[in-house]
Amino acid sequence: MKTSGTNLEHARAHNRRVVIEAIRLHGELTRAELARMTALTPQTVSNIVAELEQAELLT
Protein backbone atom coordinates (compact mmCIF):
# COMPACT_ATOMS: atom_id res chain seq x y z
CA MET A 1 0.00 0.00 0.00
CA LYS A 2 1.50 3.32 -1.11
CA THR A 3 0.22 6.32 0.81
CA SER A 4 3.15 8.69 1.29
CA GLY A 5 2.84 10.17 -2.20
CA THR A 6 -0.87 10.64 -1.74
CA ASN A 7 -0.40 12.26 1.66
CA LEU A 8 2.18 14.65 0.21
CA GLU A 9 -0.22 15.60 -2.58
CA HIS A 10 -2.99 16.23 -0.03
CA ALA A 11 -0.65 18.36 2.10
CA ARG A 12 0.38 20.43 -0.93
CA ALA A 13 -3.25 20.95 -1.96
CA HIS A 14 -4.19 21.89 1.60
CA ASN A 15 -1.31 24.39 1.87
CA ARG A 16 -2.29 25.93 -1.47
CA ARG A 17 -5.89 26.34 -0.26
CA VAL A 18 -4.66 27.94 2.99
CA VAL A 19 -2.60 30.52 1.07
CA ILE A 20 -5.42 31.28 -1.38
CA GLU A 21 -7.91 31.69 1.47
CA ALA A 22 -5.58 34.07 3.33
CA ILE A 23 -5.20 36.21 0.21
CA ARG A 24 -8.94 36.11 -0.42
CA LEU A 25 -9.73 37.25 3.12
CA HIS A 26 -6.96 39.82 3.60
CA GLY A 27 -6.13 41.05 0.11
CA GLU A 28 -2.60 41.88 -0.94
CA LEU A 29 -0.02 40.40 1.43
CA THR A 30 3.72 39.96 1.35
CA ARG A 31 5.15 36.46 1.36
CA ALA A 32 6.43 37.05 4.89
CA GLU A 33 2.95 38.09 6.03
CA LEU A 34 1.47 35.00 4.38
CA ALA A 35 4.00 32.79 6.14
CA ARG A 36 3.17 34.33 9.53
CA MET A 37 -0.59 34.18 8.98
CA THR A 38 -0.66 30.62 7.69
CA ALA A 39 2.11 29.14 9.88
CA LEU A 40 3.72 27.79 6.70
CA THR A 41 7.44 28.11 6.10
CA PRO A 42 8.60 31.05 3.99
CA GLN A 43 9.93 28.58 1.41
CA THR A 44 6.57 26.80 1.18
CA VAL A 45 4.77 30.12 0.74
CA SER A 46 7.26 31.20 -1.94
CA ASN A 47 6.77 27.94 -3.81
CA ILE A 48 2.99 28.24 -3.68
CA VAL A 49 3.04 31.89 -4.75
CA ALA A 50 5.34 31.00 -7.67
CA GLU A 51 2.92 28.24 -8.74
CA LEU A 52 -0.04 30.61 -8.53
CA GLU A 53 1.84 33.28 -10.51
CA GLN A 54 2.80 30.73 -13.16
CA ALA A 55 -0.86 29.72 -13.43
CA GLU A 56 -1.66 33.46 -13.74
CA LEU A 57 -3.83 33.35 -10.62
CA LEU A 58 -1.63 35.98 -8.96
CA THR A 59 0.31 38.84 -10.47
Image (spheres, rainbow, N blue to C red):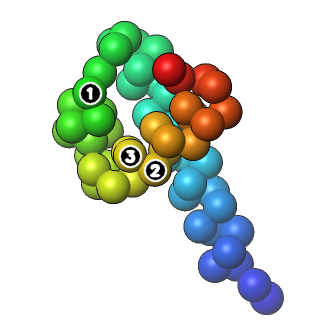
Q: Please tell me whether mark 2 sits on a helix, a strand or a loop.
A: helix
Q: Residue 15 carries which label?
A: none
Q: Which of 59 and 1 is in front in this view?
A: 59
Label located before the other in sequence (1 or 3): 1
Q: Position of residue 27 (x, y in %)?
A: 37, 11
| Residue bearing mark 1 | 30
Q: Where is residue 49 in the image (x, y as percent from the top left)?
A: 46, 38
Q: Is disc 2 in contact with disc 3, using a CB cutoff of under 8 Å? A: yes
- The foreground one among 3 and 44 is 44
| CA separation in Å, label 1 and label 3 | 10 Å
Marker disc for residue 47:
2
Q: Relative to residue 46, is residue 21 drawn left or right?
A: right
Tell me the SS state at disc 3: helix
Count the numbered circles shown. Answer: 3
How much space separates mark 2 and mark 3, taking CA atoms?
4 Å
Circle 1/circle 2 CB separation < 8 Å: no
